[in-house]
């Protein structure tokens, strides 16, 4: 067995090409690496090979892995809201690749290491997983021989397990979870190992389990937290950001905001720590953007705009020096889209379209490989979808059709390449639903119903995969409301009653969970309105009651400035329907 089997690996992972969050270096490292690299030291022979995460061979391999396997997209929230976790996933994969490249460059290397790297160049991770598993076992054997449980041998075994899991997660997140758990079993008191497990749990749709994992990490960090320990502040901020994200997924917006604010306060303390500046900037930009998302949910549009503009300013500064880095560009593009969305809500369509164009222009300096990547294509689909939404609001339906079809085509490609990617299914469902809206407006009710049915089937698959995710439940209810209306117009009253009744039930469950959520209150009011429109199968008294409850909710939202600008028309429309039915 080659001498490389005896290596000790230590990591100083501060950034992925200077753009992603990572754990600070541990003081017990046997071999030091420059920030953003790995150092491989053959035990006792003095041979140290350092490989940067920006090493050309590492970058080529990672891009290849991204192109052949699309599971590196996070599956919980909208594409432009997943960049933080996407960055973490890519960082973990890049760390594993760097270790394998370092192994292949050892003076007395193992031929299996070279063969594994050759396989990585083709997109095959299995030889590397096997290789890392052997290193894990050897590290444990060394630790057992020395009675060194909890020392460098076990730490190395944990690192090897995490790297196996990172490569495995590209193709099988369920199996990857088991390996991440093994890494935690080796180092149960290491918060970063726990956070890697939690990130994988989020990706797998296990949000409740992820929340518990992140909370365990917080408890481990607390004793080390102090004003003089900037690394602990950086680590705690990372854990709080993750908890905030999971709470937002579960619809617990107030608690999520509190965690984001606490993370921001701690993040400020780590800006002059020995961590990469771009990584800290990206964390702050992500925090502000996620806070803005919650303010939008709460109809606090000015606060949302302030948060997005702060995020945009930070991302632009990062992009000024990293304009060819995919994740930096995606971050800038995503925030431009968020700002455009707010202008759309304010019916400032010119500014909305201008920011969507800025979102496209952000990728102007990407390499041809990155520009053709699945991640950038997904981003372009999102921009086309948003552009279509604005054009619909401007009643420019013909042009809107073109953009929606481009979004649908891109998203069909992505889903066909990775049918297990829940996020891309959800985005395709949204595009199908918007296509249905356009067809419905053109009075092409049959084709609209077909589009709504396709959207609902996709939303149903996505929602059933993670029943704790309130956003997915919400969109499932919206798809039922749309389909129910089309069924009503087509005269399929029994089916319409079933769909609209289920929509009301789901919306009511969400409102019961958070009565202050204006979006969910609006959804419930609209579902009751649509249900009341079904003349067959329910009494006039029932329909009147539905309309009265709908109108009461909408008027209350309107009085408290919680009704979105494009929803302001609904109280009058419901009032007219109620008056007509009563008289």
Image (cartoon, helix red, strand yellow):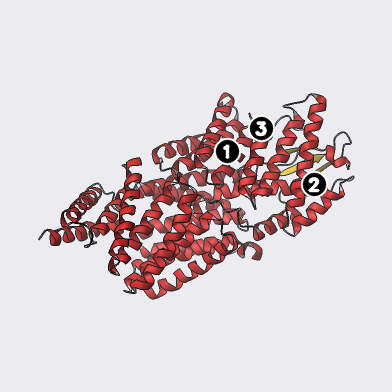
Mark 2 surroundings: few (<14), some (14-19) or many (≥20) residues within 10 A: many
Mark 3 surroundings: few (<14), some (14-19) or many (≥20) residues within 10 A: some
The numbered mark, 2 or 1, whose residue comes first in the sequence reads: 2
| Rendered-image quadrant of the N terminus | top right
Give above or below for 175 relative to 421. above
Q: Which residue is mark 1?
A: 271
Q: State how far apart marks 1 and 3 are (Cα).
A: 32 Å
Q: Measured from the top left, where is residue 364 in percent x and y?
A: 58, 64
Position of 118 with respect to 517 (left or right) is: right
The numbered mark, 1 or 3, whose residue comes first in the sequence reads: 3
Q: Label 3's element?
A: helix
Quarter of the rendering containing residue 257: top left
Nearest the viewer among 546 and 493 is 493
Circle on res. 102? 2
Circle on res. 185? 3
Q: Label 1's element?
A: loop
Q: Residue at x 37, y 60 (%)?
A: 344
The numbered mark, 3 or 2, whose residue comes first in the sequence reads: 2
Q: Measured from the top left, where is residue 262 in percent x and y?
A: 47, 34
Give above or below for 399 relative to 4. below
């Amino acid at each position: 067995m080659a001498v490389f089997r005896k290596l000790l690996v230590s990591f100083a992972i501060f950034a992925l090409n200077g753009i992603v969050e990572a754990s600070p270096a541990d003081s017990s490292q046997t071999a030091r690496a420059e920030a953003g690299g790995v150092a491989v030291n053959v035990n006792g022979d003095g041979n140290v090979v350092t490989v940067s995460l920006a090493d050309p061979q590492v970058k080529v391999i990672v891009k290849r892995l991204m192109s052949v396997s699309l599971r590196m997209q996070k599956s919980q929230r909208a594409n432009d809201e997943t960049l933080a976790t996407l960055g973490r996933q890519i960082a973990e994969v890049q760390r594993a690749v760097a270790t394998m490249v370092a192994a292949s460059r050892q003076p007395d290397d193992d031929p299996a290491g070279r063969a594994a790297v050759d396989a990585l160049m083709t997109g095959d991770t299995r030889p590397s997983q096997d290789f890392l598993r052997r290193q894990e076992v050897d590290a444990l054997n060394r630790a057992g021989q020395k009675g060194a449980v909890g020392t460098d041998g076990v730490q190395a075994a944990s690192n090897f397990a995490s790297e196996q899991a990172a490569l495995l997660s590209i193709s099988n997140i369920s199996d990857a979870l088991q390996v991440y758990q093994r890494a935690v079993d080796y180092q149960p008191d290491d918060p970063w190992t726990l956070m890697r497990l939690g990130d994988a749990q989020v990706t797998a749709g296990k949000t409740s389990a992820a929340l518990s994992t992140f909370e365990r990490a917080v408890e481990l960090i607390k004793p080390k937290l102090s004003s003089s320990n900037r690394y602990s502040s950086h680590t705690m901020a990372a854990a709080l950001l993750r908890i905030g994200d999971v709470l937002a997924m579960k619809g617990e917006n107030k608690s999520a905001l509190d965690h984001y604010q606490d993370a921001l306060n701690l993040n400020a303390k780590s800006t002059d720590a020995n961590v990469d500046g771009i990584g800290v900037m990206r964390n702050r930009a992500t925090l502000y953007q996620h806070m803005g998302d919650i303010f939008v949910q709460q109809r606090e549009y000015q606060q949302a705009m302030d948060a997005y503009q702060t995020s945009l300013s930070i991302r632009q500064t990062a992009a000024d020096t990293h304009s060819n880095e995919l994740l930096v560009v995606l971050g800038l593009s995503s925030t431009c889209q968020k700002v455009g969305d707010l202008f759309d809500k304010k019916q400032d369509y010119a500014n909305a379209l201008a920011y969507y164009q800025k979102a496209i222009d952000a990728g102007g300096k990407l390499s041809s490989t990155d520009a053709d990547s699945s991640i950038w294509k997904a981003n372009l689909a999102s921009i086309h979808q948003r552009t279509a939404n604005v054009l619909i609001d401007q009643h420019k339906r013909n042009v809107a059709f073109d953009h929606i079809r481009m979004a649908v085509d891109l998203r069909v490609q992505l889903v066909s390449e990775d049918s297990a990617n829940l996020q891309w299914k959800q985005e395709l469902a949204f595009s199908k639903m918007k296509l249905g809206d356009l067809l419905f407006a053109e009075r092409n009710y049959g084709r609209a119903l077909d589009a709504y049915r396709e959207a609902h089937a996709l939303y149903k698959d996505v929602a059933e995969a993670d029943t704790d995710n309130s956003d997915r439940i919400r969109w499932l209810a919206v798809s039922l409301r749309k389909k129910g209306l089309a069924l009503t117009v087509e005269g399929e009253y029994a089916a319409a009653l079933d769909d609209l009744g289920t929509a009301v039930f789901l919306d009511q469950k969400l409102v019961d969970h958070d009565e202050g959520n204006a979006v969910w209150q609006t959804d419930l009011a609209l579902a009751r309105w649509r249900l009341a429109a079904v003349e067959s199968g329910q009494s006039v008294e029932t329909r009147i009651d539905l309309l009265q409850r709908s109108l009461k909710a909408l008027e209350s939202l309107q009085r408290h400035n919680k009704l979105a600008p494009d929803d302001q028309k609904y109280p009058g429309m419901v009032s007219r329907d109620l008056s007509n039915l009563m008289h």
